Amino acid sequence: MDYQSWIEGIDGLASLYSFDILPDGSFSEIRLMAVNKQNEGMLHFSPDTPEFYPGIPYRNYWMDLNFERYLYKSGSEKKSLYSYVNARGFWLKGFYIPVSAAEMGVAETDTKTVYCLYILEYADNIETDSMSQHSADVSAAVTNISIKLHEEQDFYKAMAETAAEIKQICGADRCSIFTVDKSSQKCRLINPAGVQEETLKEFAAEMECSPYEISEHWEKALELSDCLILEDLKVIEERDPLWYRSLCRHNIKNIILYEIRSKQTLVGFIWAADYDTTKMIRIKNTLELTAFLLAAVIQNHQLISRLEVKSQIDGLTQLLSRNAMNERLDKLASGETARPETLGVIFADLNGLKAVNDREGHDAGDKLLTKAAALLKIAFSDYDIYRAGGDEFVVLCPNAAEKRLVEMVSQLRRLADNTSDVNFAVGIEYCTGNYDIYRAMQEADGKMYRDKAEFYRLHPEKDRRKRSRG
């Protein structure tokens, strides 16, 4: 049979596979019989791949257990199958079509040879029509998960409820959603009971790595596939002995690991253990769509979290930002936050910053600011410190004794004296009783400017303010 001539008549990225159904009902390895010219790229995936010949073992080029499972099922049951998955940022639409041995011109023998045609289409963006081509029970399960994801405003509660729903769909003993934020290298393990920080720490210790490095282990274990749905742990034993040892320690017999990607960025995993293996295809179809829904929700949460952090934290000094300070002052003034019985307000201005910027450049000025911030963190370690402006800092010290405020300011000055370039102008206002927070801020600011004026009187060579105005 001229397999190559036959497959060139197929449009799309087409490849032809075969395997044997052995007398005992088991399957042989999968063989790659032909690839049309449109799909020749798969034969050159790596410079180390061998030269193609009809019947070469498929695993010489690739290994995807889920793809193999679909081929075996389609060919052995003579049933056309369809898959639609997000793999490494691309949406892959796969058609598995059984081809009879007679059509391939192969005579019947004791060993039954089965052929399966695979046609692949891929795109950068999702096609909603393609996602809808699933059974009613899969669609119903995904709809229910979508409702749980969006009706609960609290992100972690929504993840916990979704984990519970996936656990039920899979018939699993355990199920978690593992979120991954690559920008911060932070992870969360969320099961039906909520966020499990201690469990994640214990798991990381068993894996002899950090929580974030668990995600790297799992990416490597997937080996470019979008998921592992395993009936036993043999593959895990081969690919990741540390993970295998951890699973055995907890008497886990089978595993599901499904990656969650937003485009090409990994944002998490669905993890389930000891699932109902009789539901394997339904589970995969459900998790294909569920992973897509989860990707959007997780990415949105991470984006909002980063924006919130960015608005609350000063990027250069990592102190609290002016926005964070104004928000706190507004809440104190309005009564939304109860006013402490006493409140110390400290304004600290970095003297000489403009001279450094003018003489050495803004990079040097930035280094001076970060050094000043470090000294403030040491002196006022128990309190909130804000970068209120370019070279101006504010510290709010609720329920601190007035003597303690003076001691902390003295410590700040001593720390600065031990450097060659940091000097602060400082103003303190101590509030008790029915005080006005904004009036206290004005008083501390005024005292700070009087202290700054005294500094420049004693060090006129460092005063570039008049020069900049002239």
Image (cartoon, rainbow, N blue to C red):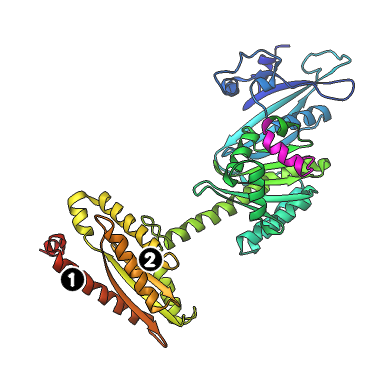
Q: Quadrant of the N terminus?
A: top right
Q: Which span of residues is magenta-colored?
A: 239-254
Q: Does the magenta stretch include residue 251?
A: yes
Label 1 to label 2: alpha-carbon separation: 24 Å
Q: In which quarter of the image is the C terminus?
A: bottom left
Amino acid on which disc 1 is placed: Glu
Query: Is residue 108 toward the left or the right of residue 243 in the image?
Result: right
Task: Name the element at disc 2.
Answer: strand
Residue 389 seen in the figure: no
Q: Quadrant of residue 413?
A: bottom left
Q: Residues within 10 Å of mark 1 (few under 14, many from 20)?
A: few
Which percent across, then down, holds residue 57?
Answer: 70, 18
Please name the residue that numbered disc 2 is placed on. 386
Q: Does the magenta stretch include residue 98?
A: no
- Is 262 in front, or is 157? 157
In the rendered image, the vertical position of residue 69 relative to residue 209, given as above or below: above
- Is 85 in front, or is 423? 423
Which percent across, then down, holds residue 464?
Answer: 15, 61
In the rendered image, the vertical position of residue 317 relative to residue 63, given as above or below: below
Please name the residue that numbered disc 1 is placed on. 454
Query: Is residue 82 toward the left or the right of residue 315 in the image?
Result: right
Which percent across, then down, holds residue 176?
Answer: 69, 51
Residue 391 seen in the figure: yes
Q: Are marks 1 and 2 in contact (CB under 8 Å)?
A: no
Residue drawn at the location 26% of the way across and 54% of the way down: 365
Q: Residues within 10 Å of mark 2 (few under 14, many from 20)?
A: many
Predominant SS of the magenta segment: helix
Which numbered tag is attached to residue 216?
none
Amino acid on which disc 2 is placed: Tyr
Residue drawn at the location 72% of the way across and 43% of the way down: 285
